[in-house]
Image (spheres, rainbow, N blue to C red):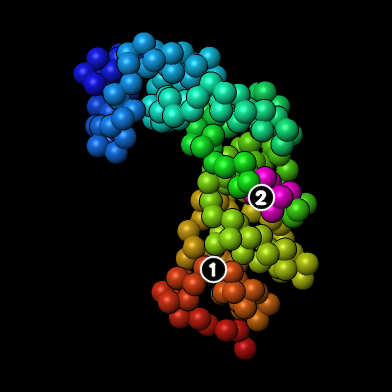
């Protein structure tokens, strides 16, 4: 483990991130130094910045996949319509996306593209959308926005990044509570019930 710690430090990874991985992913740092150098080379070739906090996460995700599975995942993204450059951008921004199952990747694409408001470029700019819960976050929010848009209750759709980063409470306060008659039941029926417990509903007259 010590040689790998020294190697990660030489790559510019801070001790804080290394310590997190020692506690949370100890097997990662037990790889041979030769393998670790190979993983880092792969990450470098994909254009990930060593100065980014995501660098060590990218190395860990590469280490968790066999060469065959890695190529299969790259093929999957290509089959979903992403270009080579777009795949690289997503990897740099959110390497954990490469650990998401094929089924979920396809479902997220289906839900987002079906709105007609988000396209592949939006997903590339916000690959974290692949990590969200489809049932508890993406679908309820897309349904709410679709209804509000169809009734001209919103001027324009928020960016995908805004929707993904917004907390349940913030989304509720901005897009649900002011329009409870229109979307309250739809939203509450789709899993995001914690807001109901934490916020008093104020149904418009």
Question: SS of the residue at dot 1?
Answer: loop
Q: Which residue is mark 2?
A: 107
Residue closest to the far bottom: 205
Residue 107 as seen in the image, left or right of residue 101: right
Please determine whether, in this image, residue 116 is positioned above or below residue 91.
below
* Mark sitting earlier along the chain (2/1): 2
Boundaries of the magenta span: 106-113
The quarter of the picture where the C terminus appears is bottom right
Q: Main secondary structure of the magenta part?
A: helix
**Along the horizontal axis of the image, is 41 left or right of 177?**
left
Q: Nearer the viewer, residue 133 or 162?
A: 133
**Could you tell me which residue is drawn at 73 percent across and 43 percent down?**
119
- Mark 2 residue element: helix
Q: Is residue 53 above or below residue 104?
A: above
Q: Is residue 20 found left or right of 172 in the rendered image?
A: left
Residue 196 in view, yes or no: yes
The residue carrying mark 1 is: 191
The answer to whether one can see residue 112 in this image is no
Q: Is residue 36 magenta?
A: no
Please tell me which residue lies in front, 177 or 50. 50
Residue 177, quarter of picture: bottom right
Please determine whether, in this image, residue 191 is positioned above or below residue 197. above
């Amino acid at each position: 483990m010590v040689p790998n710690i020294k190697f990660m430090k030489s790559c510019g990874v801070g001790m804080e991130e290394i310590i997190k991985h020692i506690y949370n992913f100890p097997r990662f740092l037990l790889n041979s130094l030769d393998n670790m150098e190979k993983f880092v080379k792969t990450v470098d070739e994909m254009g990930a910045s060593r100065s980014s906090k995501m660098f060590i996460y990218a190395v860990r995700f590469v280490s968790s996949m066999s060469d065959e599975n890695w190529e299969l995942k790259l093929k999957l993204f290509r089959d979903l319509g992403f270009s080579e450059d777009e795949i690289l951008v997503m990897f740099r921004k959110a390497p954990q996306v490469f650990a998401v199952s094929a089924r979920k990747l396809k479902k997220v694409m289906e839900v987002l593209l079906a709105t007609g408001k988000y396209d592949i470029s939006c997903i590339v700019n916000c690959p974290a959308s692949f990590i969200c819960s489809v049932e508890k976050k993406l679908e309820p929010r897309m349904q709410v926005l679709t209804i509000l848009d169809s009734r001209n209750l919103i001027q324009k759709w928020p960016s995908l990044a805004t929707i993904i980063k917004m907390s349940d409470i913030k989304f509720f306060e901005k897009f649900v509570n002011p329009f409870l008659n229109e979307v309250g039941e739809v939203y509450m029926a789709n899993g995001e019930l914690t807001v109901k417990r934490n916020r008093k509903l104020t149904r418009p007259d």
